[in-house]
């Protein structure tokens, strides 16, 4: 009889273990899954949120720029089910380098897509820490969290409450993106970048049959992707042999533009990234059309522009002001102060963007700010997503352009310093910030500018 009751108690305990996330694996149980000195991560994922493999990505596996390495997927620690604990998964790894004493090890789980590919959209979006060294903080972008300060002394245990985007609910189709382009001086070819390739530049393939049919070079990208996948098409330069001589870069304004009200604006402009929305869709971008072009292929003349901006200096306590934009690859040109007017002479095209910022500093840097400019139409509206276009504002004859903006006079324009807590500037760590430049996301770290793939662009 005692054996029966012992069996019944064990069975009931087993039922509880399989039924509830509240039954958390103990350190003793998890000790079977890692060796001393390794970092052990244990997570709970509800059954309807765990349809594909889950891997761990973080600072423990990074390149020389400290950017997290996400490929090949086989090199990333994979979460395995904890025996007898339904919904609980465990992964462990040996740190490749001594962790930062102030931040420890940073890492987060990411679910792979239906084809086993890595996708940043499927990272953890909400979590609750249970025990161990894990801390949950706000992530760099909307819908994300960061998990920091993993300890190696004991298992790090938390529950995954939500993914940023749940691949288990994603609907996948076969998509074909087509770009028809005659190229331009130096010959531009399309690359595609987006959620489907973790925002890594991927060259589109020349389709010989479509090239003959369209009587113009035609490039294609064919892949199974989830509906609402975000993407952009950018251009690189190749030589006559098809060899890449200049790969696309975030700092280069290589996006497509569309003619709107006699002004060339970036596609998709203020609406965010392009999205895939139709089953078996063929998305065609015909750059032979008169209202579409590469920004890289802009053949408008470069002209000398004398720029002056008047600021209410009493309310803008900065050491200096720079004009910065696509005209100088966002390097920044110092403006000289003449009374309460800042002046600079730059070389620019009419369609190129510019902004003003405090000298040498991005929003989020100590003392850094960006001047947002608004125009008084029916109501105050931001200009080009707070990016001014030379051709909209300059005056005078060709070759003698002048541009004067009086931001101290509220009749036509007004300005305000961008708030540091705004979504355009998110503190990642005490030394890193996210900024958005011409609609492109960058990371600022140690006064250097990096793209999302970790390459330094400034």
Image (cartoon, grey):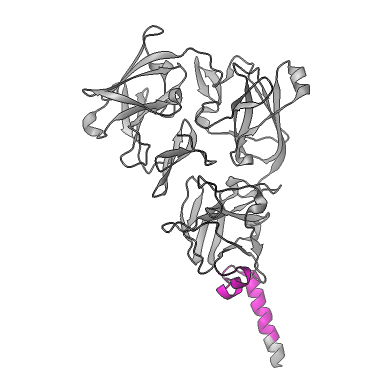
Viewer-closest of 7 and 379 = 7
Q: In screen coordinates, is 168 left or right of 446? A: right
In which quadrant of the rendered view does residue 217 lie?
top right
In the figure, is residue 334 to the left or right of 34? left
Q: Is residue 409 visible?
A: no
The quarter in which the C terminus is drawn is top left
Residue 362 falls left or right of residue 174: left
Quadrant housing the N terminus: bottom right
Q: Quadrant of residue 295?
A: top right
User: Vertical placement of 453 versus 216: above or below?
Assistant: below
Residue 15 seen from this side = yes
Task: Give yes or no for residue 164 being in the magenta stretch.
Answer: no
The image shows residue 376 at horizontal and vertical percentages of 34, 23
Q: Which residues are magenta?
A: 7-36
- Expressed as whole percent of the image width and height from the top left, the position of residue 172 reads 70, 42
- Near-viewer residue (313 or 104): 104
| 30 magenta-colored | yes
Q: Position of residue 178 (x, y in %)?
A: 69, 27
- The residue under the point 69% across, 84% down is 8
Q: Could you tell me residue 352's position as x and y percent? A: 46, 21
Image point 44% across, 56% down: which residue? 103
Residue closest to the eye, 189 or 110: 189
* Residue 33 in the image: above or below residue 311: below
Furthest residue to the right? Answer: 209
């Amino acid at each position: 009889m005692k054996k029966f009751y012992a069996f019944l108690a064990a069975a009931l305990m087993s039922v509880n273990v399989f039924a509830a996330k509240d039954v958390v694996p103990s350190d003793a149980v998890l000790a079977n899954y890692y060796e001393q000195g390794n970092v052990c991560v244990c997570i709970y994922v509800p059954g309807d949120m765990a349809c594909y493999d889950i891997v761990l990505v973080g600072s423990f596996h990074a390149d020389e720029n400290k950017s997290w390495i996400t490929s090949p997927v086989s090199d990333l620690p994979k979460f395995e089910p904890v025996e007898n604990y339904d919904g609980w998964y465990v992964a462990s790894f040996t740190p490749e380098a001594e962790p930062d004493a102030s931040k420890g090890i940073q890492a987060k789980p990411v679910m792979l897509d239906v084809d086993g590919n890595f996708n940043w959209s499927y990272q953890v979006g909400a979590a609750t820490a249970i025990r161990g060294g894990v801390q949950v903080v706000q992530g760099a972008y909307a819908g994300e969290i960061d998990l920091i300060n993993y300890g190696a002394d004991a298992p790090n245990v938390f529950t995954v409450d939500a993914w940023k985007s749940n691949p288990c609910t994603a609907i996948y189709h076969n998509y074909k993106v087509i770009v028809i382009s005659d190229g331009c001086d130096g010959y531009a070819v399309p690359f595609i970048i987006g959620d489907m390739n973790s925002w890594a530049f991927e060259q589109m393939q020349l389709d010989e049959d479509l090239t003959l049919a369209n009587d113009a070079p035609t490039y294609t990208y064919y892949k199974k992707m989830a509906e609402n996948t975000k993407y952009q098409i950018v251009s690189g330069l190749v030589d006559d042999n098809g060899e890449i001589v200049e790969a696309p870069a975030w700092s280069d304004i290589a996006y497509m533009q569309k003619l709107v009200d006699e002004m060339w604006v970036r596609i998709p402009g203020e609406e965010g990234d392009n999205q895939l929305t139709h089953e078996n869709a063929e998305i065609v971008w015909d750059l032979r059309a008169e209202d579409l072009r590469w920004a890289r292929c802009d053949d408008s003349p470069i002209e000398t522009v004398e720029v002056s901006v008047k600021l209410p200096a009493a309310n803008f306590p900065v050491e200096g002001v720079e004009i910065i934009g696509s005209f100088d690859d966002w390097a920044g040109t110092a403006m000289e102060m003449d009374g309460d007017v800042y002046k600079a002479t730059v070389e620019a095209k009419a369609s190129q963007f510019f902004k003003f910022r405090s000298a040498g500093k991005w929003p989020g840097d100590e003392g850094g700010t960006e001047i947002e400019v608004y125009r008084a139409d029916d109501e105050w509206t931001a200009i080009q997503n707070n990016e001014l276009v030379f051709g909209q504002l300059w005056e005078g004859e060709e070759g003698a352009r002048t541009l004067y903006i009086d931001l101290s006079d509220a009749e036509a324009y007004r300005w305000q310093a961008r708030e540091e807590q705004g979504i355009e500037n998110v503190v990642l760590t005490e030394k890193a910030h996210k900024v958005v430049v011409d609609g492109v996301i960058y990371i600022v770290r140690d006064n250097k500018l990096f793209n999302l793939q970790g390459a330094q662009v400034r």
